[in-house]
Amino acid sequence: MSVVGIDLGNLQAVIAVARNRGIDVICNEVSNRATPSIVSFGPQQRYLGEGAKTQEISNAKNTVVSLKRLAGRTIDDPEVQEVEKGHLMAELADANGQAGVKVSYLGEEQVFSNIQLLAMYLHKLKEITAVEIKGPVSDCVITVPGWFTEVQRRAVLTAAEMVGLNCLRLVNDLTAAALGYGITKLDLPEEKPRNVAFVDIGHSSYSVSVVSFLKGQLTVRGSAYDQHFGGREFDAVIVEKLAEQFKEKFKIDVYSNKKALLRLRVAAERCKKVLSANPQAPVNIESIMNDKDVSAIVNREEFEAWAAHLFNRTETVLSQALENAGMKPEDIDFIEIVGGTTRIPAIKASIAKFFGKDVSTTLNQDEAMARGAALQCAMLSPVFKVRDFRVHDICSYPIKLTWEATPEEEDTEIVVFDNNNSIPSTKILTFHRREPFTLQAVYAKPELLPRGINPWIGQFNIKNVQPVNDEPAQIKVKVRLNIHGILSVESAYTVEEKMVDEEVKNKDGEKEVKKVKKLVKTGDLPVVSGSTGISKELINEYTEKESQMYANDKLIAATEAAKNSLEEYGYEMRDKVLGPLSEYIDPNVKDKFAEDLNAVVDWIYDEGYDAPKSVYVEKLEALKKIGNPVVERYREAEERPHAERALRETIQRLTQEAMSTDEKYAHIPAHEKARYC
């Protein structure tokens, strides 16, 4: 059984697996430990991860990035239209109300929703993992930002379900990092908590969590976020400034050319990384547009001046996180930084200045979340036995339930899970009703939500409610915020106050039975739920479509492999037949075979370029029917001297043993020995 942790980043994903010897981060098909979060579409197949990365510029309009940022978003979401649209080269489209893209795939225009796109990418990660562990992949834990809302979390779970991933938990990314940090610490205190601030600045967002550690447990005290502060914002600053320089110096406008802009973005990201370790970075782009080569030198001081407005925002999130945790900077014992953007020296300096102490890099900045997610998966899996370590996480937004007022109850709402409420968590609410009623779940403070997110969470209809003895029925409703951070009404039931026999002790300490009043459960009530997730019918449709596309990708890959095998055989045998294999093939066959080999190589690059897999296999088998016997004769000729020598040596050894007068051969009659001499 697989035990897998997936750190789902906006730029790239990292996969970790739990094994008997510990947690390993696995490599993809090109031996990289991180896989680009990109999906691309072509005339014959899809390209996912590394394959899509190579298509990012050449096939820009059919290549999709920002998979995580699009998850759960609607097409009219201002975040999609005003922010993510600027990072996408593919055309945005309405996919059943969801944010999607319109691309050219298999020779026709098709629209895919954000859930479908995310599912495609998760399918690729599943495939990478299966190759590494040499077995099926099912159970996993996936990281999401702490600021993800119900609809976004449901989108990730749906995408995972579509490709056969059983997500045991959606874990907040910094909670995963904290787990990886805490479970390895053997010196955690038993009484006074150790307070650690975890700071993650990734590709597109900035998160801070304050976590208290005691021996065998962690508790998240408070978190804060900036959803528009990450590496891509710093890249955009470099792009803007260099575009201005190039316009003035080379008389070109990169914003007028999508491919030129993409190439400049790639160069800007590289420039930013170089400046994190060096005082200056060169930028050189050949033939960026209009056949012009451009170049520039960016100094670190220059970059820091350009991005001063971004650096000034660093402390805001830190302050908010401490306020939510009810702490001050001096209460923090250690600061752990993760995420690629924290490598920028000015970022590190700003964080250290705020807390008044140096930052720590105990954790691997790129892999900490994936490792923590794999640990969480191992803790939830029956296959692994992990040292007991309790994780107390919190929800980021308060949730309330609303209902219509009745003569018996004037209240119409209650905050059932407040900000920083622990998850998972269960609450039981009491209602007095004469008839069925409806509960609406909404976020209590919409202003805290990511922009454009609908505060509505779900609707729960409590059915079959009837009065009891002409009085309102007393109803208990069990509400749960589950391990994923998703709200549900688990059950509803009626209770009645009844006299029951109960054994109690009197003043003399003797036991006696008395009648006491108690609430007794008298019947379950059906609950019909409606949520922010997509319908089951649409999930089935998406799943079927994904299965078809995956099967097509596998067929195309197998066809390409068959074509490559045929081409390789053609070139290799053509040279050998006219070389070392020449004397082992019938002269009457050799010239014709060589012609056939030349013909098949030419055919591959002509009318056979897009042939079906079966044709490639058939042609290869036909060639091997002639070539394999030749190769076998060559092999026999090569190995014959060695075999002959081995045979002679064996005969000589046995002859010597047969002539031996050693006592151990004394029982063999002389006439028997003579037969071998």
Image (cartoon, helix red, strand yellow):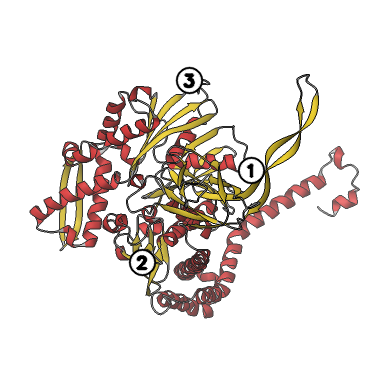
Residue 1 place in picture, x, y as percent: 62, 49
- Left or right relative to 523: residue 263: left
For marks 2 and 1, the one nearer the N-term is 2
Residue under label 3: 192
- Nearer to us: label 2 or label 1: 2
For marks 3 and 1, the one nearer the N-term is 3
Residue under label 2: 94
Residue under label 1: 383
Task: From this view, report whether residue 298 is shown above or below residue 349.
Answer: below
Residue 527 place in picture, x, y as percent: 58, 56
- Name of the residue lying farthest toward the front: 470
**Amino acid marked by disc 1:** Val
Label 1: element kind? loop
Whether residues under marks 3 and 1 lie with C-beta atoms below 8 angstroms apart, the answer is no
462 and 167: which is toward the camera: 462
Task: From this view, report whether residue 430 is shown above or below residue 301.
Answer: below
**Amino acid marked by disc 3:** Lys
Whether residues under marks 3 and 2 lie with C-beta atoms below 8 angstroms apart, the answer is no
Q: Residue at x 76, y 25 (%)?
A: 505
